[in-house]
Image (tube, coloured by chain):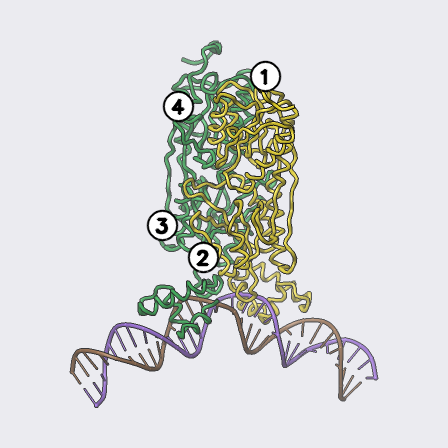
Chain colours: A yellow, B green, C purple, D brown
Amino acid sequence: MNLRELSKLLGLSQTTVSRALNNYPEVSEVTRKRVKDAARRHAYAPNRWAKGLATGRPNAIAHVVPVDSTHEMVNPVFADFISGAIEVYTSHGYEMILSLIRAGDGPRIYRDLAARHSVGGLIVHAPMRDDTRLAMLDEIGTPYVVHGRISGARRPYNWIDMDNRRAYRRAAEELIGLGHERIALINGRAGMDFAVRREEGMREALAAAGLPVDRALIAGDEMTEQFGYEAAMRMLEARRPPTAFIISSLVSAIGTRRACEALGLKPGRDISIISHDDDLSYFRHDGAQPYFTSVRSPIREHGTQAALMLLRAIETPQEAPLQTLIEAELIPGRSTAPPPKSSPPEPPAPNLAS
Amino acid sequence: MNLRELSKLLGLSQTTVSRALNNYPEVSEVTRKRVKDAARRHAYAPNRWAKGLATGRPNAIAHVVPVDSTHEMVNPVFADFISGAIEVYTSHGYEMILSLIRAGDGPRIYRDLAARHSVGGLIVHAPMRDDTRLAMLDEIGTPYVVHGRISGARRPYNWIDMDNRRAYRRAAEELIGLGHERIALINGRAGMDFAVRREEGMREALAAAGLPVDRALIAGDEMTEQFGYEAAMRMLEARRPPTAFIISSLVSAIGTRRACEALGLKPGRDISIISHDDDLSYFRHDGAQPYFTSVRSPIREHGTQAALMLLRAIETPQEAPLQTLIEAELIPGRSTAPPPKSSPPEPPAPNLAS
DNA sequence: CTCGCGAGTCAAAGCGCTTTGAATCTGCCT
DNA sequence: AGGCAGATTCAAAGCGCTTTGACTCGCGAG
């Protein structure tokens, strides 16, 4: 069933039928009702192609997800982010197209998407520090929203991010307040913008407390369970193990927990862990006190916000880019405690000033 | 840059340029090269709408994911499945559109997708036993592939599934072989087709070994970490706890592990766990022996297969539906062992026959 | 020298929708 | 009765592509 058939059926012109369906005011209410009823009865839905061609208005949003070619990974966080965004799109008449991009593909994909005309804008995932994509996107002219930030950017751009530095400073302060002095950070891949900020946050807290930074207690990689396990294992078996961990991802934190338990260390008693809780639906704790003390930022909400921001950028391009910084909470759980007394206090270093 | 501009630029007709770009044989090689070079130089990409309208050939595949309205969940397994499928689509010139569907939305979404004409087919996720969607899709006439199976289906349809029954029977046999008699199943939501099959598989093994089925040792729900924890906790604290668990999802298995450890039970020593490993990239163990003994079926591969099957169904609709049953492996890990001796042997029930 | 043929190219129609500008139909005022 | 504004409706153009059917051009066969 197409518009012509439908209009013929109703004895009306295509113009009138089209206007009736699109809620134009110059159609009488009685006609509109008649048209809409008929459309429903005959399961008429406008052809997206024809509509797009006629209006020139984009009807899709692309999410471009970089995929590390060696690992072929899709971050589980991504699923929740998307599910937040997608609802916004559908309720505004856009469809979401998903596009994986390999490290090597570079600009081509973005240019193709833009040249298609059907894609009104896109969400940039997993920004790196000094990511070159922005310059390219600005040149291409497609509206975009970055989930995260890119430090080296020249011009203002739309982004939504959590306050990583503040949150991780806060997390480290919490541990320091409990008496920890050797705090490890198990972080995302080096170069990822969020990872840089998180490390900065922790360093700030250590510096403020006059604590040294031990490079051996900082690890960064793709945040798998396995990585959380191995990094923790390595640190815990070293000469001077940490008494606490801050971990950038719940998935890796689960790996770290596994490592601790393998060594007979009980989190919340012998060792402390602060995890990162993206409020992933499949890992959500409805119960009373959560297992992990964690930095919580609701990722689904990020998705919703990013989508709204993008639609705004598409529909009112003249307005200035928007920035949204989301504060993260530190949720108390049962995985943190003061460091165990048993660990022998460091002998005071000979020439420690003042 | 559009076709007309490009052709004017080259001093050729639109016809010739179009044909050159689409590799039609009736264009001389020298012209074709000239055209392709110019197209690249001016970043020309055909307008998808116009192309679709002109050819009538679909250029998108939809993945329709049911979302439980109360939980708003996106299964982490889904991310990996999709990433397998998407590569197939892009390499065949299709784009993937993602569509969430609420329990209530029912047929409307499917009909709309079909009426759009741009969507050539779809993947049905999360089928329930006696799912009514198939009848509807058959009526609508869109090609589709089911990830999983639907027992009550009337007519043959395209599906790809793992051999759930066999795999879970095998898992239960493994535990029975180790000497376990009280085996718990922490399963997916009741009514999900895969959950039904898995339970059947376990029951078969129990029956074959002459072991009774204890309803209290079977739980089913959305497979979150929390559910794995709570279900296990409930069972372990009951009067007659299980000595082994079979768990339908790695995520829930992690919750179960947490429960065991909270009670001082070490998996692989005091309690046995067989998990379900979807080979999720973020949970993949590259190392030697994995932590969990588990039923493994590579979900990403399912995605690839499903996509290929769907494209075949779209491009050669006359062919009969295809079925692919994938065998799952049972991967030995460190979470299984014979039941602990300490547990007092059951006093023989008075009137147990022969 | 003409004709036929294949290779290469072209003009124009058509895909299904929106939108412009004009036409028609009311009812009501003068 | 005539005129006019406002309310409805309409015919036709145009969006950018593919594809049909026709045209042009060389060249070898007759």
Task: Tell me the CA gap for discs 4 and 1.
Answer: 52 Å
Residue B249 against residue B25 in the figure, above or below: above
Do residues under tags 1 and 3 come within 8 Å of each other at their CB atoms? no
Residue bearing mark 1: A345
How packed is label 1: few (under 14 Cα within 10 Å), some, or many (20 or more)? few
Q: Are marks 1 and 3 on the same chain?
A: no
Residue bearing mark 3: B320
Checking the image for residue A155, the label placed there is: none
Nearer the observer, disc 2 or disc 3? 2
Q: Quadrant of the C terminus of chain B?
A: top left
Task: Tell me the CA gap for discs 2 and 3.
Answer: 22 Å
The residue under label 4 is which amino acid type?
A: Glu
The residue under label 1 is which amino acid type?
A: Pro
The chain ID associated with circle 2 is B
Nearer the observer, disc 4 or disc 3? 4
Do residues under tags 2 and 3 come within 8 Å of each other at their CB atoms? no
User: On the rendered structure, is B68 left or right of B120?
Assistant: right
Viewer can see residue B124: yes
Residue bearing mark 4: B173
Precedes in sequence: disc 2 or disc 3: 2
